Image: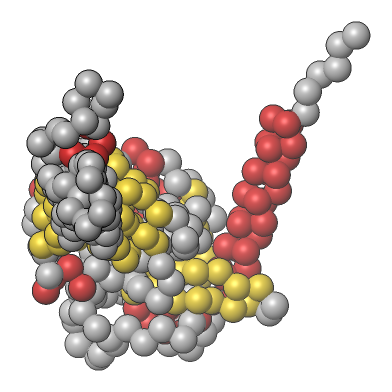
Amino acid sequence: MKFLDQAKVYIKSGSGGAGAVSFLREKFVEFGGPDGGNGGRGGDIIAECVEGLNTLIDYRYQQHFRADTGVHGMGRNRTGADGADVILRVPKGTQIFEEDQETLIADFTEVGQRVVLLKGGNGGFGNAYFKTSSNQAPRRANPGQEGTEKGIWLRLKLIADAGLVGQPNAGKSTFLAAVSAAKPKIADYPFTTLHPNLGVVRVGEREFVLADIPGLIEGASEGIGIGDRFLGHIERCNILIHLIDGTSEDVAHVYKAVRYELAAYADVLADKDEIVVLNKVDALSEDEIKAKVKALKKASKAEVRLVSGVTGQGVEQVLWDVINFLDAEKAEAVEMEKKATETKWTP
């Protein structure tokens, strides 16, 4: 399945059905009177968050969605049927924006959420509605209200507990494949991941979701390479795992380059907690490891984990670091919620 995380679609709600002008014509009924029914309501355009989807690929092949028009009213006071609604099914993590791509309409973070994007037009009144004591034979009826239309943008931001960041060929896909059942493309020649990948990591009886995004190069924020648009997929992550290729000549420069691109994209990424990991240590000598750890500590001002995604060295320790951080975050959130709900008693 192809991965698509952004799509523009055109939507139009259904118009209401017209009211009917009708008079009762029946044997032995001398004064039948008006009996035109009302028109049905037009269909709505609804967005719903569902399970089983992880891409917006369906909207690559269909970009126009129009709800049904309400059925016109008929004689004998028959009201027209309402038009059928159109439901846009989207994966968890989808955001819906107006055509300007800035005004947020909806943000789906839980399965089952529904938002009415456009309401259908009301049905018109039939002539029976206009009957009064002074006008007992009205010959007028209302047309149905027109539906509304507009263009919207769907933007998917994957929801994961932790995110993998780093330059191309830092070993992010190898790390993801080693700790989860995900099967990203891995080869023995240099290339970069082109689409984000998700994997469920299990450590003992615990588990969390890990996201791997395409590598960042210097100038990605200015559109160099494949750019930095995929960074939106780690905006919701609680913590970042920053992988640095241990075979790089200047690991401090590599670290700073990625941090610069994160900050250039959004402050929220620059402020996230991170675990600094020196990867591919199986290809380094002891002296090289010591020198690069020293340079990396000076640049990041943080503890550096030594990992080899190929041999599995140090991988479990990084996973437990993530688990411990998530537990601490959860405990802090519970404590803050508890304090917010406590009310100070006063006589």
* Picture residue at 50% right of the left edge, 53% below the top: 238
Q: Where is residue 314 in the image (x, y as percent from the top left)?
A: 55, 76
Residue with the most extreme top position: 347
The front one of 38 and 96 is 38
The front one of 153 and 171 is 153
Q: In this view, does 31 lie to the left or right of 343?
A: left
Q: Position of residue 160 (x, y in %)?
A: 45, 63
* Picture residue at 26% right of the left edge, 36% below the top: 129
Colouring used for the render: secondary structure
Q: Position of residue 7 (x, y in %)?
A: 16, 60
Q: Is residue 279 among what the camera can see?
A: no
Residue 39 lies, with reference to residue 145, above or below; the image says: below
The front one of 137 and 157 is 137
Q: In this view, does 137 lie to the left or right of 172?
A: left
* Picture residue at 41% right of the left edge, 83% below the top: 182
Q: In this view, does 180 lie to the left or right of 133?
A: right
Residue 344 lies, with reference to residue 209, above or below; the image says: above
Q: Where is residue 94 in the image (x, y as percent from the top left)?
A: 33, 57
- Quadrant, the N terminus: bottom left
Question: In which quarter of the view is residue 80 placed?
Answer: bottom left
* Picture residue at 54% right of the left edge, 55% below the top: 303
